[in-house]
Every structure is written in C-alpha cells, then in structure tokens.
Image (cartoon, rainbow, N blue to C red):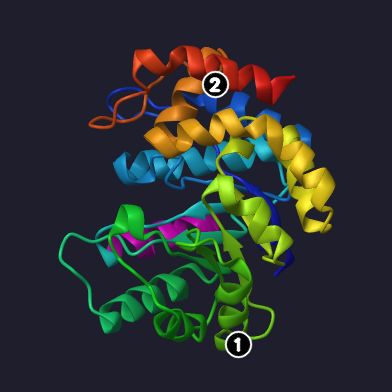
Amino acid sequence: MQALRGLCAFPITPADADGRIVEADLRRILSRIVRAQVDSIGLLGSTGNYAYLPLDERRRALEIALDAVGGRMPVIVGVGALRTGDAEALARHAREAGAQGLLLAPMTYQPLTPDEIVTHFARVAEAGGLPLVIYNNPTTTRVTMDVALLARLAALPHVAGVKMPLPAAETFDAEIAALRDALPPGFVIGYSGDWGCSRALMARADTWFSVAAGLWPDTTLTLSCAASAGDAASTRQAEERFQPLWDLFRRHGSLRVIHTAARLMDLTETDPQHPVLPLPDRELSALRSAIRAMER
C-alpha cells in the first residue's frame, strides 16, 4: 500500500503530567511535518508515548492530528494496548475518525504464545478494517517475532506491512531477502532505529519509520530520498549532520532525546510521561550541538 511507503515521521505527543494532550503543542509539531511533505505521519508510536497515555486522550490526540493534517498526508496511528478489547476499540475509533492505517505492537505483561499473538492481531485488524502494520519492537515489548510468526500475521486480512528493528549485525540485504521470500508480494517492509535506516533503504526496504523526522522532517527527508535512490555519496553526505543525534539516541534512547530536543526548540514545555525521565542535564550541551547540526 502506497500510504505505508517512504518516510513516515513519528512525532512526540505533548501531554501534561496527568496525560492530557497539549493541543497547541501537538498542532505546532505536526505543522512542521506537514510543511515538509513527508510521505506519512506515525501518530502514537513509542515516540508518541502511546503506552503511557489514557485511552480517551489517545483518541483525542488522533482527532486533533487528523484535523491539523487536513487530509494532506496519511496518518497511521498506534493502537497497541495490553487488553485486546482496548486495542479493538482504538482500532474502530481510528477507522471512524478517518485514519489511513494502524500500527500494532503486542503489548504484554504475561508472556504471549504465538497463537495468542496471532489471535490478538486478527481481532484488532478485523475491528479496524484498515491497513495494519505489525510493530516488531522486541526492545520495548519483549516479544520477539521470527519470520515464521511474521508470515502467519501477514496472512491475516488487513495486515499490510511490518515495522522491523535493526538487525543485530545490520545485515539488511539478507534479512530483507528472507522477509520478501516469506511474506506476501507487495507486503511493506520498513525499519525503525534511525541510525541504521538509511542503510535499510539502500538495501531496498520500503519505509523508514523515523523519530528524527518528527522534529526535523526536511533534513530527514533529504537523507531518506538519497538513500531510497541508491545514491551512496549523497546519503553519506546527508547523514553526517545526524551523527551527534544518533550518538545520543544510542546512549539514552530516542524518546528521552527527542522530548528534550522539543523543549530546547521551544515546541513544547512537556516532558515524557513518568516514570520515563527527560535527558540528563549533563547531556544538554551535546544535544544543543546536535540540534545545531540538524538545522544548519
């Protein structure tokens, strides 16, 4: 599906300490993404704090975003929840509100069996009736999806793509080839983990699900286009300015870095939802340098 391909920008979801969305801040951040004309917006992903927000505020965030975007680009929304019933309800709301796609991670407290994961995805996909992207994120969910499980999920109605973590050795060619062999023709294969995604695109991945694009959509789009075109020289040149940011992402996780960057850029005064804390003060100088590099 074309709406799931290219550069998908994942914004933060500014919210106060009680989890209430700060509408003006969310609109301000989304307006930067819309102006840059990236391919899609990934609302309420991990960067968007979806797991820490009340369900009614998640619905409200989507409604604000759809109004702010005004149909100018597709909005894909995260509907992951511990309870299948909650995820189904979020998926139904996403369809009714006008979202163009869903993103689903198998959130869990009790370890899930493959059959439980398949049943969960089948129910949520059916409830939403929209193209659904499998969110394969073992770092946060502690659920590892192998190719066999991904193939079972990909066979379900409405399941149209997968958001993969970076491979351990960043052997994209081999992994993408194995996924192409196992998954249906035209199935969208994308990656997150910003510091490796240009290499994924060079290896013919379909999508970059990008944290950086949530704050610096223009700069990230330049890199994405170069990598998608297979232009190695332009990709290396564009990626140089990202290196200080990638270093911070690796040390502290992108959520803490990107929230603190948004504050330093006067886009919001909010912090991540507790218990997650913002970037330590000792790293603020490095972050300011990274922001200057991204904006030069």
Q: In this view, does 63 lie above or below 203?
A: above
* Front residue (pair 68, 29): 29
269 sits to left or right of 291:
left
The foreground one among 200 and 129 is 200
Q: Position of residue 57 (x, y in %)?
A: 38, 38
- Name the mark on residue 24: 2
From this view, report whether residue 203 is shown above or below residue 24.
Answer: below
Quadrant location of residue 145?
Answer: bottom left
Q: Which residue is drawn at 61% across and 43% down?
A: 66
Name the amino acid, label 2: Ala
Quadrant of residue 274 within the rendered picture: top left
Q: Please name the residue shown 58% across and 22% down the image.
A: 290
> What residue is shown with label 1?
181
Which dot, 1 or 2, sits closer to the camera? 1
Percent from the top left, x then y, of residue 161? 57, 70
Left or right of residue 141, residue 137 in this image: right
Q: Which residue is drawn at 73% across and 33% down?
A: 219
* Quadrant placement of the C terminus: top right
Is residue 89 highlighted in magenta? yes
| Magenta-highlighted residues | 85-96
Cα separation between marks 1 and 2: 45 Å
The amino acid sitting under disc 1 is Asp
Residue 164 position, x and y percent, is 50, 63
Q: In which quarter of the image is residue 191?
A: bottom right
Secondary structure that dominates the magenta span: helix
Q: Is residue 235 left or right of residue 74?
A: right
- In the picture, the quarter occupied by the N terminus is bottom right
Q: Earlier in the sequence, mark 1 or mark 2?
A: 2
For label 2, the SS is: helix
Residue 159 visible here: yes
